[in-house]
Amino acid sequence: MRFFEFDTEKIDRFRQLTDRAKRVAVVCHMTPDGDALGSSLCLMHTLSALGKHVTVVTPDAPPKTLGFLPGSERITVNSYQHDKARNAFLNADLIFCLDFNDLRRIDRTAPLVEASAAPIVMIDHHLNPTLEAEIAFSHPEISSTCALLFLVLEAAGLAGHIGREAATCCCAGMMTDTGNFAYNANDPGIYRILAELMERGVDKNDLYNKLFNTNSLTRIRIMGFCQYARLHVLDEHRCAITTLSLQEARDFNYSKGDTEGLVNIPLSIPGIVYSIFLRQDEEDYIKVSMRSKGNFSVKELCERHFDGGGHLNASGGEIRDTLDNAMARILELLPEADKMLEDYSEL
Ligand code: 5GP
Ligand code: MN
């Protein structure tokens, strides 16, 4: 990807649309992560520097832990600023959909996008896009939407407008989607982008501290509790399952983001190929998170069983049932997963 080349016509069309646009709406997926927010805010800063009026809309509230990202105070949250969000799409002459490729990922924001007459530019790195866009940059081989966004802006001749704040947001997304360049990080091209961003004044040490080295006491306690008391290792299935019930979440004063990264930890146990985390968000609503290694596709499992999807090695979904029943459903799919393990390779 070092010298990534886009289709020239597509880039020309992108440039035309952005040049012409005066009012831009940017939307990313619900429960936005560093890459979703980072790419949205990077684009907001860059297009604002070009004199455009930009509104970033998130379907629900971003986690407080990402509130330090420059410009996050300007985000419009559709779940409680619905009129403002609706107007942003109604008045927009260009819409950007970032870090998702399926309208179901933006929940109740989808009708607002559908009702708008503005053309849509999609920039995303998930597999199997279904979103219909005027221009779609869909590149699952690139580790973050932020890196892809940088390449698109650069190809369109707009990289000169990426200032320190935009670069900081972009770098944050590249870091969070690769675990600070620990996985999906073998592409030399991302280090060229990183260098470009740091030339613009990004303080990467500071970003690392804020993104990876800042924990609330509640988060530390919940992570510790789950690993100590709620982690089940099924050696013979090469699988680890961690749970957090609604009651436990309440007891520990859980808030959004407190279990971020928890699902990755059991993958560090030799022999474990995939890890599942079940978090009971409501009595009969379980958020499913899965991580895997090599060619074992948790995306397939999440799509087939949990109305979800994502990436080969990092996916999610949901179970509309109690935690006990959710656990039972996970145990039921172990034979199917065992079959998948027969073809397992580390890649
Ligand atoms: P996480 O486990 O961190 O919540 O999500 C990991 C990845 O799985 C995300 O980057 C996202 O791509 C995907 N994902 C998580 N939840 C869902 C879901 O409910 N539906 C779909 N389609 N993808 C999801
Ligand atoms: Mn992403």
Image: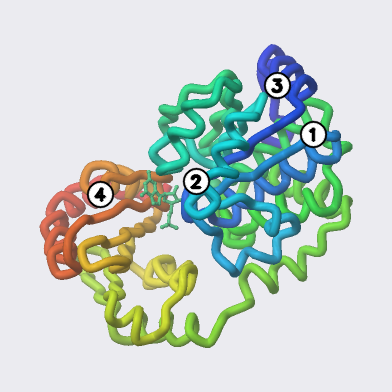
Asked if the residue under mark 1 is in contact with the one under mark 4, i.e. CB atoms within 8 Å, the reply is no
**In the drawing, does residue 117 fall left or right of residue 101?**
right
Q: Which circle, 4 or 1, is nearer the viewer?
A: 1
Q: What residue does disc 1 label?
A: 52
> Helix, strand, or loop for circle 3?
helix
Q: Nearer the viewer, residue 278 or 72?
A: 72
* Residue at the far front in the pictured view: 83
> Helix, strand, or loop for circle 2?
loop
Q: Position of residue 134 (x, y in %)?
A: 57, 18
- Give me the C-alpha separation between circle 4 and circle 3: 35 Å
The answer, for residue 65, to whether it is visible in the render is yes
Q: What residue does disc 3 label?
A: 14
Amino acid type, label 1: Lys
Mark 1 residue crowding within 10 angstroms, few (<14) / some (14–19) / many (20+): some
Q: Nearer the viewer, residue 115 or 303?
A: 115
User: N-terminal of the two: label 2 or label 1?
Assistant: 2
Q: Quadrant of residue 158?
A: top right
Mark 2 residue crowding within 10 angstroms, few (<14) / some (14–19) / many (20+): many
- Give me the C-alpha separation between circle 4 and circle 2: 18 Å
Q: Is mark 4 within 8 Å of ligand 1?
A: yes
Q: Which circle, 4 or 2, is nearer the viewer?
A: 2
> Helix, strand, or loop for circle 1?
loop
Q: What residue does disc 2 label?
A: 29
- Give me the C-alpha separation between circle 3 and circle 2: 22 Å
User: N-terminal of the two: label 3 or label 2?
Assistant: 3
> Helix, strand, or loop for circle 4?
loop
Q: What residue does disc 4 label?
A: 306
Amino acid type, label 3: Phe
* Residue at the far top in the pictured view: 9
Vertical placement of residue 130 versus 308, above or below: above
- Give me the C-alpha separation between circle 2 and circle 1: 23 Å
